Image (cartoon, rainbow, N blue to C red):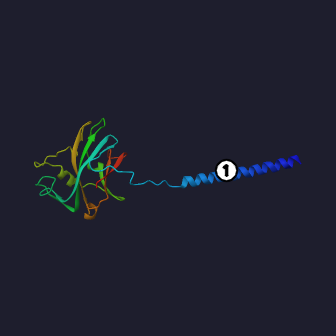
Amino acid sequence: MKTIRFKKLVFIAFIVLLFISGCGSSQMKTAANKKMTVNKDLVKSPKIGDTVVVGKMVYKVNKVHTTAQVGPDSQVGPSVLPLKAKGKYVVINVTVKNNGDDSVVLKDNFLKLKKGKKMFDTDSKASLTANLDKNQHIKNFYNQNLLPGNKATINIVFDVAPSVASSPNLLLQAQEGVSGMHSALIDLK
């Protein structure tokens, strides 16, 4: 009789343990499957005028404007090399500082324009024109070596559809280098 009672107790204990462990794991699974919600108003992106550290590079967007051309009668570039946008130019004036130990060649592909999920590359020719002085010399270290500790202010130009250019939801993706291992988004409102 004692062995039957003992077997019944072991069986009941096993069922209770199984039930308890099953309830616990389903609660844990339910808790793990719940998505965390974040109030987007509390998470603020850096904006125009903010200093943003991206790896060993520091970026500060100074101003943003749109234009139909760079060159004559525009706010950027020399008057002898006008370039007209296929859509509308978004010109971003940005100061870049190299906090690294090595020189960095400032390339226009360090920066990308973003609207929603769409990414836009720079217009290299328009960016070059926007960084020439009236004597057609490159100013501001655009496409040249930026030594450690130095900074430069450059114009980066994107040729986008007019609806993109006028969007209030444009972001600038700034990255540390060509690889883009470190990047940040800057709100262009």
Residue 40: x, y in percent?
40, 54
The residue positioned farthest toward the right in the image shown: 1
Location of residue 115 by image quarter: bottom left
Location of residue 53 by image quarter: top left
Q: Is residue 142 left or right of residue 186?
A: left
At horizontal 82% and vertical 51% (from top left) the residue drawn is 8
Q: Is residue 174 left or right of residue 130?
A: right
At horizontal 80% and vertical 49% (from top left) the residue drawn is 9
At horizontal 27% and vertical 38% (from top left) the residue drawn is 103
In the rendered view, tell whether residue 83 sits above or below residue 140.
below
At horizontal 31% and vertical 54% (from top left) the residue drawn is 171
The residue positioned farthest toward the top in the image shown: 101
Residue 114: x, y in percent?
32, 56
Asked whether 89 or 185 is in front, the reply is: 185
Residue 142: x, y in percent?
21, 46
Which quarter of the rendered picture does the C terminus lie within? bottom left
The reply to whether residue 159 is visible in this rendering is yes
Asked whether 150 or 132 is in front, the reply is: 150
The reply to whether residue 92 is visible in this rendering is no
Q: How many marks?
A: 1
Where disc 1 sits, the SS reads helix
* Amino acid found under the numbered disc labelled 1: Ser
Residue 72: x, y in percent?
12, 57
| Mark 1 neighbour class, 10 Å CA radius: few under 14, some 14 to 19, many 20 or more | few
Which residue corresponds to mark 1? 21
